[in-house]
């Protein structure tokens, strides 16, 4: 009788261990809409832009800045500041649902000091095949850029910039 009792206890213990060992079914992942998936991918790509290609830099340097006070700073001014070493790409970030690339140009030219900061909505094309580690970007042609804007600034459109495509 003792052997039967111990066997019975052994089977009960084995059944209890088997029950503890089973894992509950994993909850089903929520479905992601194509629009949300695209936004997540754009956000990831935008955050990863550390260095842009020469073509991307040319796009940002080609900005034509027109202020509400009728002061106009064309690509020529930015080009001259660039030649003097005053232009710098400042990275990219998401603002609302759009990826913006930032640039600054500063220096003295024509007897005046200039400090321009702007951002342009961009689309990422791919990694540059000719410049490894750099991203190809292109300005979104039907959108305008923001002047006097730096990384982290809230969305604003008080002053407009338009991109000139040659």
Image (spheres, helix red, strand yellow):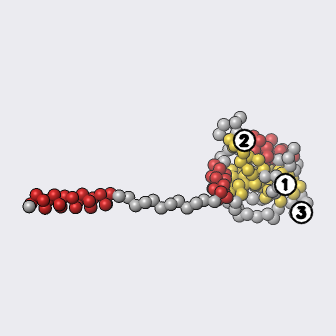
Query: On screen, 58 above or below 72?
Result: above
Q: Quadrant of residue 19?
A: bottom left
Q: Residue at 83% of width from left, 44% of height from top?
A: 79
Q: Using the numbered discs, state the Cα–Cα distance from disc 1 to disc 3 in whole angstroms.
A: 16 Å
Q: Is residue 22 visible?
A: yes
Q: Position of residue 157 (x, y in %)?
A: 79, 63
* Tag 2–tag 1 contact (CB < 8 Å): no
Q: Using the numbered discs, state the Cα–Cα distance from disc 3 to disc 2 in whole angstroms.
A: 33 Å
Q: Which residue is mark 2?
A: 53
Q: Residue at 18% of width from left, 61% of height from top?
A: 9
- Report helix, strand or loop for mark 3: loop
Q: Which residue is mark 3?
A: 69
* Tag 3–tag 2 contact (CB < 8 Å): no
Q: Which residue is mark 1?
A: 162
Number of callouts = 3
In this image, 17 relative to 56: left or right?
left
Front-most of residues 92 and 44 = 44
- Report helix, strand or loop for mark 2: loop
């Amino acid at each position: 009788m003792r052997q039967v009792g111990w066997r019975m206890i052994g089977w009960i213990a084995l059944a209890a261990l088997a029950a503890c060992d089973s894992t509950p079914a994993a909850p089903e992942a929520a479905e992601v809409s194509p629009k949300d998936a695209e936004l997540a991918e754009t956000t990831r790509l935008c955050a990863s832009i550390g260095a842009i290609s020469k073509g991307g830099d040319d796009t940002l340097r080609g900005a034509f800045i027109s202020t509400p006070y009728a002061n106009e700073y064309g690509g020529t001014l930015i080009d001259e500041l660039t030649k003097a070493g005053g232009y710098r790409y400042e990275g990219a970030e998401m603002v609302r649902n759009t990826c913006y690339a930032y640039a600054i140009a500063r220096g003295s030219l024509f007897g005046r000091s200039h400090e321009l900061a702007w951002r342009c909505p961009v689309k990422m094309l791919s990694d540059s095949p000719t410049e490894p580690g750099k991203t190809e970007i292109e300005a979104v042609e039907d959108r305008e850029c923001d002047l006097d804007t730096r990384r982290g600034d809230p969305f604003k459109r008080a002053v407009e910039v338009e991109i000139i495509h040659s």
